[in-house]
């Protein structure tokens, strides 16, 4: 018996072993025998030494990015993770491709996601939200806020400025207040704190006040006749048809009428005392004008009986600042003379050296001790006089030369030392001031002076219908002193009749739309 090598068999070891005998090839694989071995020729779809293994398309791990491979024989399908695409899931899907980011935001592609980098002013995942910059109420002082892109715009309320309207505009910055007035900055306005010389709103104008056309219900002309020594009360006559009434304008304020006691009907006022508490003039009673004195609300006729002129026309022309002395005229039988009535004394006729057919007392000093006026002679001469009531007789005011004629005294200063009036110089009317010791006439230029301040330094009058002011002997038209004042728009100044003791307030009359209107004027 032969001991055969491993790959042979048979009695004589003549036969090679058939290694395919055991059919090692699976799945239909064909076995090919060899010496001591075999090989399998596999059918399609199988592999391995014995064709034992089914061939798969996934064998080469074609699916990328952690996708799942599903083999179908040699074919395969990749089941991609979210965010990938392609047969082998090799492609990172561009989630930015659909432009998901709004309002100009920058899109950054990620794995199964995108990230939006918003432009300033936007928020939200997709930058879809316009941030409301007004939400924090950045606009101050009542401004309205307009929401913009990455910004806000404030529309300021009037009077404010700045990005956030935080600044109160200084309306005083332009120095709108004139004549040294202080300016108070307000909200969208300023207020000028005027000295009492000037009027609001900008203190640009000297204060003036016309008697309103509504005085006594309207339709009355008003004519200034005097001003109280303290400058607070303007006295005026109001006329309408044949009616006349006394009115006053108090401290540039409201005008009111002076109520007459019975039995007076119509009345006119010509003189007022220091504070306006005493008014003198004439009141109609029994069809005759009577010299009256109004103290407070009491009207009385002056008792002129010692003068013996009977039922004459009598008129009070002026009253002393202290209210105790009244001067005026008595007219009867074609003549007129002047009277002087002092409280506690019988009334007297004014004694003067000059005699004539008309003697008028025009003014009296503060304490009633000095009276001035003028006398018209039967020859047409006119002479000014001044009477110190402590003396027996008044003296004619001297004139410097024979070329001066027709002198008249119209006003006397409170201290009695300065007399103003007029005279004809070479036949031309001139304003005159008598002052000094002895009283000496000074030519103030053409015109007529009506009144002067307490010390005689400020004189008012009229030159050919143009109201005039003299500061000392320097003359100016009243209009030029006032300047262009809107309160006098359309007004033509006619006359300046009186000035306060301090020389600061003038009583005057203007014509507005054909109607006379009294006014107070503040001087600088
Ligand atoms: Ca992606
Ligand atoms: Ca916004
Ligand atoms: Ca302001």
Image (cartoon, helix red, strand yellow):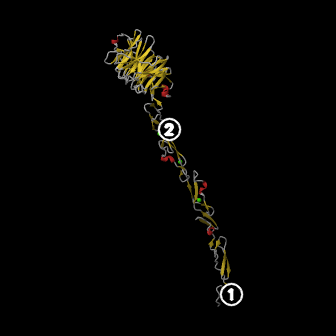
Residue 303 point in image, percent of width and height: 34, 14
Does residue 115 sit above or below 56 in this rendering?
above
Work out which residue is located at the far bottom of the displayed protein and give it. 1
Viewer-side residue, 309 vs 515: 309
185 or 508, nearer to the observer: 508
Figure quadrant of residue 84: bottom right
To which residue does mark 1 refer? Answer: 14
Q: Is residue 285 visible?
A: yes
Camera-side residue of 437 and 499: 437
- Residue for badge 2: 174
Residue 267 shows in this picture: no
471 lies above or below 405? below
Counting every numbered tag in the picture gives: 2
Q: Quadrant of the C terminus?
A: top left
Mark toward the viewer: 2 or 1 = 2
Residue 377 on image: x %, y % = 43, 12
Q: Position of residue 180 (x, y in %)?
A: 46, 35
Some atom of ligand 3 lies within 8 Å of the CB belonging to the residue at label 2:
no
Callout 1 crowding tier (Cα within 10 Å): few <14, some 14–19, many ≥20: few
Q: Earlier in the sequence, mark 2 or mark 1?
A: 1
Q: Quadrant of ligand 1?
A: bottom right
Name the side, left or right, on which 415 lies relative to 483.
left
Badge 2 vs badge 1, beta-carbon distance below 8 Å: no
């Amino acid at each position: 018996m032969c001991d055969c090598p491993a790959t042979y068999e048979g009695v004589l070891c003549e036969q090679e072993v058939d290694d395919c005998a055991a059919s090692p090839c699976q799945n239909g694989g064909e076995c090919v025998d060899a010496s001591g071995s075999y090989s399998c020729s596999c059918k399609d779809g199988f592999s391995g030494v014995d064709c034992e293994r089914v061939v798969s398309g996934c064998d080469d791990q074609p699916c990328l990015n952690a996708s799942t491979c599903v083999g179908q024989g040699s074919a395969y399908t990749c089941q991609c993770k979210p965010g990938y695409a392609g047969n082998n899931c090799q492609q990172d899907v561009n989630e930015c491709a659909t432009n998901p980011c709004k309002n100009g935001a920058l899109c950054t592609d990620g794995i199964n996601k995108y990230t939006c980098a918003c432009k300033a002013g936007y928020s939200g995942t997709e930058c879809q939200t316009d941030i409301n910059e007004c939400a924090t109420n950045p606009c101050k002082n009542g401004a309205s806020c307009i929401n913009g892109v990455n910004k806000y715009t404030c529309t300021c309320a009037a009077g404010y400025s700045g990005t956030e309207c935080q600044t109160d505009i200084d309306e005083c910055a332009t120095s709108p207040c004139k004549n040294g007035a202080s300016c108070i900055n307000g909200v969208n306005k300023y207020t000028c704190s005027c000295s009492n010389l000037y009027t609001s709103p900008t203190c640009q104008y000297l204060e003036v006040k016309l008697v309103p056309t509504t005085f006594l219900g309207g339709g009355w002309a008003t004519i200034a006749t005097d001003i109280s020594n303290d400058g607070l009360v303007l006295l005026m006559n109001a006329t309408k048809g044949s009616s006349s009434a006394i009115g006053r304008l108090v401290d540039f304020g409201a005008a009111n009428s002076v109520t007459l006691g019975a039995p007076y009907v119509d009345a006119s006022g010509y003189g007022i005392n220091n504070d306006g508490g005493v008014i003198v003039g004439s009141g109609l009673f029994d069809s005759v004008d009577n010299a009256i004195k109004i103290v407070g609300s009491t009207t009385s006729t002056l008792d002129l009986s010692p003068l013996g002129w009977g039922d004459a026309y009598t008129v009070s022309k002026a009253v002393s600042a202290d209210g105790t002395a009244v001067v005026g005229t008595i007219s009867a039988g074609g003549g007129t003379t002047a009277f002087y009535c002092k409280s506690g004394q019988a009334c007297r006729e004014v004694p003067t050296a000059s005699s004539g057919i008309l003697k008028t007392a025009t003014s009296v000093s503060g304490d009633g001790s000095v009276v001035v006026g003028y006398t018209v002679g039967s020859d047409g001469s006119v002479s000014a006089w001044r009477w110190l009531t402590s003396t027996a007789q008044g003296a004619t005011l001297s004139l410097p030369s024979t070329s001066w004629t027709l002198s008249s005294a119209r006003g006397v200063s409170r201290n009695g030392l300065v007399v103003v009036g007029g005279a004809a110089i070479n036949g031309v009317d001139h304003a005159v001031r008598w002052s000094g010791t002895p009283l000496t006439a000074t030519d103030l230029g053409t015109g007529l002076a009506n009144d002067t301040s307490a010390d005689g330094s400020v004189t008012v009058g009229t030159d050919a219908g143009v109201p005039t002011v003299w500061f000392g002997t320097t003359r100016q038209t009243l209009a030029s002193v006032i300047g262009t004042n809107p309160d006098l728009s359309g007004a033509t100044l006619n006359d300046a009749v009186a000035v306060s003791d301090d020389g600061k307030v003038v009583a005057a009359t203007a014509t507005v739309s054909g109607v006379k209107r009294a006014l107070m004027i503040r001087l600088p």
